[in-house]
Image: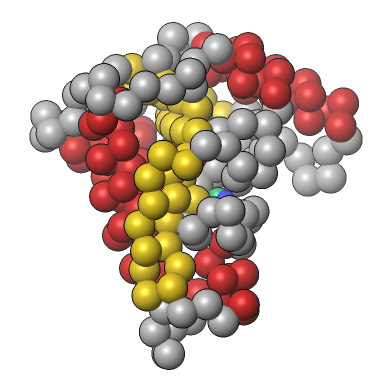
Amino acid sequence: MRIVVLVSGSGSNLQAVIDAADADELAVEIAAVGSDAPGCGGLAKAGAAGIPTFTVPLEKGATPNRRAAWNRELAASVSRHSPDLVVTSGFMRILSAEFLSTVGVPVINTHPALLPSFPGAHGVRDALAHGVKVTGCTVHQTDAGVDTGPILAQAAVPVSEDDDEASLHERIKVQERRLLLETLAKLAAGELTLR
Ligand code: GAR
């Protein structure tokens, strides 16, 4: 299964996929890694692993027209690598309906909260601020909404009294990596099919 991974941040989930694929524990070929954030850690991790990378930056405060053009440019960059699946992991941009239809293969996303609770860019912070005692992570199929697509897998993570955003996020990421690898393995084996 050929995948393109989109990242904006440190790329720890990406590294887990790289390691599992390198160790032949996952029947996945990472065709390319793309980003909106030049110089981010995820691009460096991909480069270090010899994986082709591409960057399609988007300025802050971009107009709707500019966002539409950016989505088209990103879709073209992704499609050049002919993936069977696109994985967004720590990719902090909303993909448009046009992106999804142009790419024409399923997109899955990891999110650090138990959707449909706490969607958006600050899932861990928002869960802590709400005072939940249990949060977690979700792998879901991406639609044109904000973290709204069909849920594929979830794992719960208890919140400790002394947790801050960073400590809670680190424990969530442990489960997130496991969930992402399990989901990719099921997709690669044909045990899970996405429309
Ligand atoms: C992950 O926890 C991912 O779920 C989250 O960013 C982190 C990226 O970590 N994504 C979102 O919050 C998207 N709404 P990583 O760059 O180390 O893999």
In this view, 28 is above or below 44: above
Image quadrant assignment for residue 85: top left
Q: Mark yes or no: residue 37 visible.
A: no
In this view, 62 is above or below 124: above
At horizontal 66% and vertical 44% (from top left) the residue drawn is: 146
At horizontal 42% and vertical 78% (from top left) the residue drawn is: 159
The percent coordinates of residue 92 (x first, y second) are 60, 46
Give the camera-side residue of 98 and 114: 114
In this view, 115 is above or below 146: below
At horizontal 58% and vertical 53% (from top left) the residue drawn is: 116
| 38 displayed left or right of 66 | left
At horizontal 52% and vertical 77% (from top left) the residue drawn is: 132
The percent coordinates of residue 51 (x first, y second) are 33, 26
| 100 displayed left or right of 40 | right
The percent coordinates of residue 106 (x first, y second) are 49, 22
Q: Mark yes or no: residue 179 visible.
A: yes
Looking at the image, the residue that sits furthest to the bottom is 161
| 168 displayed left or right of 8 | left
